[in-house]
Amino acid sequence: MKVSLTWLNNYVSLKGIKPEELSQAITLRSQEVEDLSPLVDIEEGVTIGEVTGCRPHEEAEKLSVCTVDTGEKKRTIVCGADNVAEGQKVVVALPGAVLAGGMEIRETTIRGVHSEGMICSLSELGIDEKYHQEEGIHVLDPAAPIGSDALEYLAFNDTVLELDLTPNRADLLSMHGVAYEVAAIFGRNLSIPDPELITSEQANTVEIETQTEGCQSYYGRVLEEATIGPSPRWMQARLIAAGIRPINNIVDVTNYVMLETGQPLHAFDYDALRSDRIVVRDAREGESFVTLDEEARTLKAGDVLITDGERPIALGGVMGGLDTEVTSSTRSILLEAATFDPARIRRTSSRLDLKSESSMRFERGVDPQKTRYALDRAAALIAIYASAAVRDGVQNVDRHARGPRDVTLSLNTLNKVLGSNYEAPAVRDVFNRLRFPYDEEDEVFTVHVPSRRQDVNTYQDLIEEVGRLMDYNALPDTLPTTLSIGGLSSRQKLRRHLRRTLSGLGLFETMTYSLRDVSRIDDLTLENGKPVELSKPLSREHHALVRTPLHGMVDVAAYNRARKQESIHLFEIGKQYTSEAERERLGLLMSGPYHHHRWRPTPPTDFFTLKGVIEALRQALNLPRFHYEAITLENYHPHQTARIYCKGKSIGHIGKLHPEYVEPQGLEDVYVAELDIESLEALQQEDYTYAPVSPYPGVRRDIALLVDDDVPAEALKDSLASVMPDRLQSSHVFDVYTGEKIEAGKKSIAIRLTLADPEGTLRSEDVDALIAEGVEALSREHGAQQR
């Protein structure tokens, strides 16, 4: 909402309040002020002049040499506008003036002619073209006084305050609402003008009927003998300050009163109606209607239509119809003021992409007490500025419940919630400043909330009103009185542990977008399913919620690789969205060298590098042992992909992305993994097992085994652990070989064993016996042969 301070001063005196002070006070006690700026950023040097002479420039056919009377002297000014002519009153920027954009006006010589200023267009004054659409200089009316301040004459000497409103404060979408707010903050008097309406003897014969619950009220007035023309300068300036383009006196009045009261209005060409009946009904499914922007709209059941009994003439709360538009030939007007169901207006305007100042106000809810006032106010202004005659009487249908809402608040509750010690007189003062009528008994206030404040419905809302107007900064500092002890949940602790561990392992955390092209939503997941799609996506690329954080991580890797980054090691705590649930997932991605070494070549990341990171994470989280089982997944390498199990439950997967998937994105050798965080939390062991450090040395032995190609190394390690549970300290695979001298279907696996006896030093014969026993078990269980 853009607020003209000159306009605001009509309702509440701003005397003694600097614009900066007003901005700060509103921000602290009401809504955030997004911007404070002059309507036209020119301090001085712009005056009104009269072109007393105009001749072509002898050296440039597109230039004119003008003699301009600016009051104190006649000046020669070279002008390039096509529309400049003798006898015009114009805006003149004198030497020394600084126009919009920082252009300083100086005396200069143009093609041999000395020029003493500049004749200005509205754009050169800083008024955006969308508000005037003029070509050339701006020509003032003949009554403009020569030598006067041009900005003051045009009513551009104004300051505009822009509010960033929250959705609940619909009352601040009007100048009246802002005036109520400023009057309450500064404790000043409020002056809302009453419509001074004089009607003719001819009666209003229009009949109004509503056949839909989507229209709660509809008021109509008829005006005749209107003269269409421009609106007054002050009204145009205020509309421009509010961000609305002036059009003509009729349309400008409806927009002006909408901004003033918050009640949208619409003017129909009364002579274009086919009857004296206005029927408000629901649209029929598939019904077509041409709006003011000349677009044919296909409607749905539930859209609200205004008709003349025979055909649609407006889409209720959204936009008028082309056939009944006010034009330069219009003489009679039907003026409409109505209220509609906010939810219906929101659905219609969103579906048809017809967002307007009117629909925004209807969507948030308008004050039903302002509907008749706004109608009469607009009729009075049209009578003045379009010389129209207003027919006697208003036809209407109104289903709104009358009267304020009663909300009760006790002084004890107020002080308990705010931690304050306010007394009743101070609270009375706040309600009086807010213009909230109330009854008081035994320090209990029953407040009769006026309809303009639709956001105040409970005692908590009243507490907020008192707190903000008394100034939150004035509340005493108190510690919360609670018996609860703060702490992190188990999930929060797990997230922190994951971040610390993975950061320590050299991975960088990413936070990527949760939306994806629906056609690629299952690219990197274990399970497919129905995607969770947005009903109104911003683009095709952001159509559905992701099933894995890996999508965004691959995008991040491609972005960094395109910028010459070789080592890309990432993790992300993201989400998996399905139609049934939302689960947290840990994504890992590694590509390129892992830990650079200056003094020796760094091997590239491979499958086992990422598996090692996962195992390090498992140990840090004190999780049971993981089991890896080879699987085949689309977009993954067929021989380097595995599902991860823990205690027989699938908790994720690990694999290398298929070259055909990553190469189009400028990547190669990308390894990814995904783990279910909920499963990790459930499997996390609270207790750690401690054992004394053995004083006896361990013995290392390497064994090489020939086994079938499909025998996993983990199975061999499990068999060895079962044979020598108390003596085997560790075992790990350090070589796997297939090829020359190894028959087809076989592989050679080398395992390094560390053996120790907690009761004494192992003798060589003891070690040999343990190795023999282990090899025998491997042969029996897996058909292994020692090499």
Image (cartoon, helix red, strand yellow):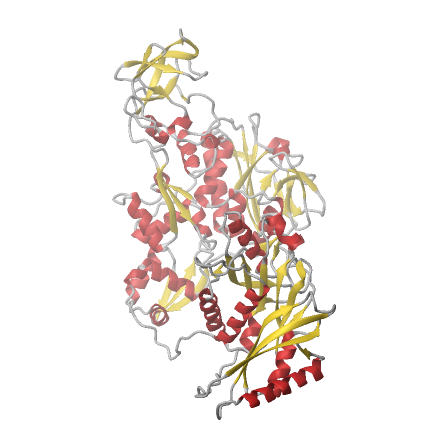
Q: Residue furthest top?
A: 58
Measured from the top left, where is residue 786 in percent x and y?
A: 66, 79
Measured from the top left, where is residue 250 in percent x and y?
A: 51, 32
**Residue 656's quadrant in the figure?**
bottom right
**Residue 624's quadrant in the figure?**
bottom right
Q: Residue at x 62, y 53 (%)?
A: 662
Q: Which of the pair 578/9 is nearer the observer? A: 578
Q: Residue at x 30, y 43 (%)?
A: 19
Number of marks = 0
Q: Is residue 27 above or below residue 19?
A: below
**Residue 736's quadrant in the figure?**
bottom right
Measured from the top left, where is residue 724 in percent x and y?
A: 59, 87
Measured from the top left, where is residue 632 in percent x and y?
A: 70, 64
Q: Which of the pair 66/504 is nearer the observer? A: 504
Q: Which of the pair 595/647 is nearer the observer? A: 595
Quadrant of the rendering where the N terminus is positioned: top left
Residue 14 is at least partly visible in this image: no
Quadrant of the rendering where the C terminus is positioned: bottom right
* 297 horizontally vs 515: left or right: right
Q: Residue furthest bottom?
A: 759
Q: Residue at x 45, y 42 (%)?
A: 259
Q: Residue furthest right?
A: 744
Q: Is residue 288 above or below residue 715?
A: above
